[in-house]
Image (cartoon, rainbow, N blue to C red):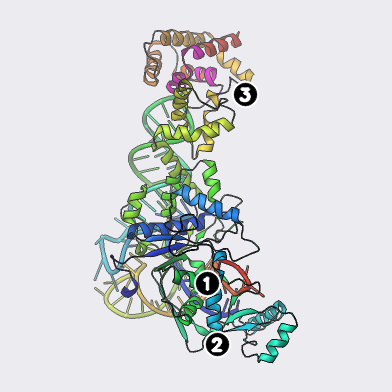
RNA sequence: GCCCUCAUCGUCUAGGGGUCUAGGAUACCAGGUUUUCAUCCUGGCGACAGGGGUUCGAAUCCCCUUGAGGGUGCCA
């Protein structure tokens, strides 16, 4: 890496995250936002949110709202943007059209751009020809030197032109100084006179992004590697417009399970940030996990909070190779966050899922009910990857007893040994001063010593009688949550069933 | 096809010439805790894509091959 391009510690940096509102935001995009955010926070710089809505066909205000919502959810606050304003606004490209026009006209006047009237068919033909010759498909510049009468003729024929940039031939080699990849050079012969203005009167991405980044005083452009090939074009524009060129950093891409770039259609809905939010992934966990995709902390510990990640983060430690998005590891990490989090918080976040499952009927939960819910969720959270799994994990505490195989259950409850176990258990529970999991567990230990039956005969029938299941949470927890009355009831019912 | 990038356990990664018989995390397997599932603890399995160089010495530097990804749009 070149020392000159590494920013100094005291330099004020400005970063940006420029999503296009053409779809819901997915993991790849928000990871880019995260890295920009981290670097901004680490360096005490600013993060700008800019909405790149120059695609009139596909841009949608709804998507803009979703993007903002998900950024907030993950805790990625921006310093300037459409909602918070700022001195470099407006922050929607659709509201900056006058600005782009000004620079477009400047290029036109300086003979650095020209109108092109070629049809899509003509362009396709050109590309085919280039491909056949084994060259990069490129525009051949046939409209570059149209005479004004030729132009007029085309205009009168009703053709709306695009504006193309007159790629200078003087720059033989264009070098992108990348903070992650080092110097990447491109031969200018692979560049063509690319479109900077569409026929619908909107600037293209490459044009608008350069103007905005320059005018918004962006010092560091951190974006996905898929933009690396665009960068030489942008550098040419910076030069033509006499703008200062920012530093670049192209992040490794995040791949889906098929090792292809994560995109809208990858793996159903699993790539959208909103899906993770809805399933009950904790933002802290996703934040932590995403930070580890492409970056690794100085120490070996991987569970890190926001502050620790900001402290440890550095662009220099970002690696170059693409990373597969591994949901298994996210699940582990999220589960860990759920288990380590404050119980009250997890209870609060679990309520919507329990309501949806119909396990909580009332809009307002009484404090007594809440106490019980806390116990249930404390037990249930040890077995989940995300909160949407809480209802199924805690089902047995909400629904009545149901034996999957009634016949089998009946047999299980048969015999004097089982009766002895159940009656002893009830007795011991009733003589208990305070009911808590530990006390229940010691009752079971006592029974193992005192009763002439094996451990399995103690635990298994009890579990089945109380839950209808053959496996589940610890008995101590189950009985603690169910309460003595309910336990008594279910044990007696089981004995009746056996008769 | 052409251009660009990348290449360490299945996955995420540490490693920037000797300390690497390659470290951690996850996943998986086994043992322990537990009546059970989960949690938790311990242990195990498991990788430097291949070939040439450079060097006393290469996972680390160079080249080639191969593979993967990205780009090649009046999408961003």
Can you identify the residue that label 2 sits on? Answer: A111
Q: Is residue A436 above or below residue A354?
A: above
Q: Chain letter for mark 2, please.
A: A
How far across and down, in percent of the image, does residue A435 sit?
40, 15
Tag 3–tag 1 contact (CB < 8 Å): no
Which-is-in-front pick, marks 3 and 1?
A: 1
- Find residue A404 and name its label: 3
Regarding mark 1 in the picture, which secondary structure is present there? Answer: helix
Nearer to me, A202 or B22: A202
How far across and down, in percent of the image, does residue A418 sit?
51, 12
The earlier-in-sequence mark between 3 and 1 is: 1
Q: Report the magenta stretch's main SS.
A: helix
Regarding mark 2 in the picture, which secondary structure is present there? Answer: loop
Residue bounds of the magenta highlight: A461-487
Nearer to me, A452 or A353: A353
In the rendered structure, does residue A484 fall within the stretch colored magenta?
A: yes
Residue A392 is at least partly visible in this image: no
How far across and down, in percent of the image, does residue A300 sit?
32, 51
Q: Quadrant of the N terminus of chain A?
A: bottom left
The residue under the point 59% across, 66% down is A54
Which-is-in-front pick, marks 1 and 2?
A: 1
Left or right of residue B34, residue A95 in this image: right
The residue under the point 61% across, 81% down is A138
Which-is-in-front pick, marks 2 and 3?
A: 2
Q: In which quarter of the image is the C terminus of chain A?
A: top right
The residue under the point 44% across, 25% down is A375
Can you identify the residue that label 1 sits on? Answer: A99
């Amino acid at each position: 890496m070149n020392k000159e391009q590494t920013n100094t510690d005291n330099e004020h940096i400005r970063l940006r995250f420029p999503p296009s509102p053409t779809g819901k935001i997915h993991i790849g995009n928000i990871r880019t936002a995260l890295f920009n955010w981290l670097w901004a926070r680490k360096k005490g710089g600013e993060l700008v949110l800019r909405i790149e809505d120059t695609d009139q066909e596909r841009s949608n205000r709804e998507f803009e709202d979703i993007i903002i919502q998900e950024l907030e959810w993950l805790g990625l606050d921006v310093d300037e943007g459409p909602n918070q304003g700022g001195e470099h606004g407006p922050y929607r490209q659709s509201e900056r059209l006058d600005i782009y026009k000004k620079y477009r006209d400047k290029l036109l006047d300086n003979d650095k751009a020209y109108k092109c009237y070629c049809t899509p068919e003509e362009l396709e033909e050109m590309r085919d020809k280039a491909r056949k010759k084994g060259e990069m498909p490129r525009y051949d510049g046939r409209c570059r030197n149209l005479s004004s009468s030729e132009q007029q003729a085309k205009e009168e024929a009703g053709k709306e032109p695009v504006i193309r940039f007159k790629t200078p031939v003087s720059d033989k080699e264009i070098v992108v100084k990348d903070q992650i990849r080092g110097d990447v050079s491109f031969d200018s012969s692979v560049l063509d006179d690319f479109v900077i203005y569409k026929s619908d009167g909107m600037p293209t991405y490459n044009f608008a992004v350069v103007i905005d980044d320059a005018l918004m005083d962006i010092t560091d452009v951190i974006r996905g590697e898929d933009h690396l090939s665009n960068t030489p074009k942008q550098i040419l524009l910076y030069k033509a417009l006499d703008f200062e060129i920012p530093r670049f950093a192209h992040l490794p891409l995040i791949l889906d399970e098929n090792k292809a770039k994560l995109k809208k259609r990858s793996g159903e809905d699993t790539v959208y940030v909103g899906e993770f939010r809805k399933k009950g992934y904790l933002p802290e966990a996703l934040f932590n996990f995403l930070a580890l995709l492409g970056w690794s902390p100085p120490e070996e510990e991987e569970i890190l909070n926001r502050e620790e990640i900001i402290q440890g983060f550095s662009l220099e430690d970002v690696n170059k190779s693409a990373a597969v998005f591994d949901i298994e590891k996210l699940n582990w990490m999220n589960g860990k966050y759920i288990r380590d989090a404050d119980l009250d918080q997890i209870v609060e976040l679990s309520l919507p899922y329990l309501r949806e499952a119909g396990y909580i009927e009332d809009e307002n939960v009484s404090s007594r009910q809440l106490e019980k819910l806390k116990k249930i969720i404390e037990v249930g959270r040890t077995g989940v990857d995300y909160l949407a799994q809480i209802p199924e994990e805690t089902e047995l505490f909400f629904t009545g007893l149901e034996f999957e195989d009634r016949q089998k259950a009946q047999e299980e409850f048969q015999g004097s040994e089982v009766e002895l176990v159940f009656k002893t258990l009830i007795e011991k529970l009733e003589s208990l001063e305070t009911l808590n999991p530990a006390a229940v567990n010691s009752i079971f230990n006592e029974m193992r010593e005192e009763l002439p039956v094996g451990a399995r005969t103690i635990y298994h029938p009890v579990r089945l009688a109380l839950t209808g299941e053959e496996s589940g949470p610890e008995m101590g927890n189950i009985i603690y949550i169910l309460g003595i009355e309910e336990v008594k009831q279910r044990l007696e019912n089981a004995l009746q069933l056996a008769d």
